[in-house]
Image (tube, rainbow, N blue to C red):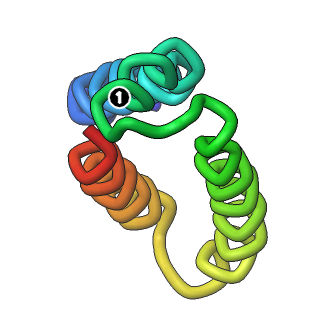
C-alpha cells in the first residue's frame, strides 16, 4: 500500500473505529438506564425485558444480513449504512 492510499484510508479507519467504540459504549450502557426510564414512564424495571430481547434479535438479524450485503455492496458502503442505522436507532432510543 503506497502513501497516497494510506492517507485516504487512515481518516476512514479512525472514523469507523471511533464510531464502533461510541456505539459499543451506548449499547453497553442500556442496563444502567433501565431504572431511569422505568421511573420516567412509571413502569416496573422488569417491563423493560423487551429492550434486551430486541437488542439481541437486532444483532442476530444484522449479522445474518451482513453476509448477504457483502455479496452485493462494497465494504465501505456497508459500514456507512450500518453506522447510519445504528445512529438512527440510538437517536430514537434516547
In front of the other: 70 or 36: 36
In front of the other: 69 or 4: 69
Residue 54 sits in which quadrant?
A: bottom right
> Residue 6, percent across and down?
33, 26
The residue located at (47%, 31%) in the rendering is 1
Residue 82 sits in which quadrant?
A: bottom left
The residue located at (59%, 29%) in the rendering is 45
Name the side, left or right, on which 6 lies relative to 73.
left
Name the side, left or right, on which 12 lies relative to 66.
left
The residue located at (45%, 64%) in the rendering is 78
Reading the image, the residue beneath label 1 is 19
36 lies above or below 63: above
Name the side, left or right, on which 45 lies relative to 87.
right
> Residue 60, percent across and down?
77, 61
9 lies above or below 21: below
Q: Residues within 10 Å of mark 1 (few under 14, many from 20)?
A: some
68 lies above or below 33: below
Helix, strand or loop status at disc 1:
helix
Amino acid at each position: 500500500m503506497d502513501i497516497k492510499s494510506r492517507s485516504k484510508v487512515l481518516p476512514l479507519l479512525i472514523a469507523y473505529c471511533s464510531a464502533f467504540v461510541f456505539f459499543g459504549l451506548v449499547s453497553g450502557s442500556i442496563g444502567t438506564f433501565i431504572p431511569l426510564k422505568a421511573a420516567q414512564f412509571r413502569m416496573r424495571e422488569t417491563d423493560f425485558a423487551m429492550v434486551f430481547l430486541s437488542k439481541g434479535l437486532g444483532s442476530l438479524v444484522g449479522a445474518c444480513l451482513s453476509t448477504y450485503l457483502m455479496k452485493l455492496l462494497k465494504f465501505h458502503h456497508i459500514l456507512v449504512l450500518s453506522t447510519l442505522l445504528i445512529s438512527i436507532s440510538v437517536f430514537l432510543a434516547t
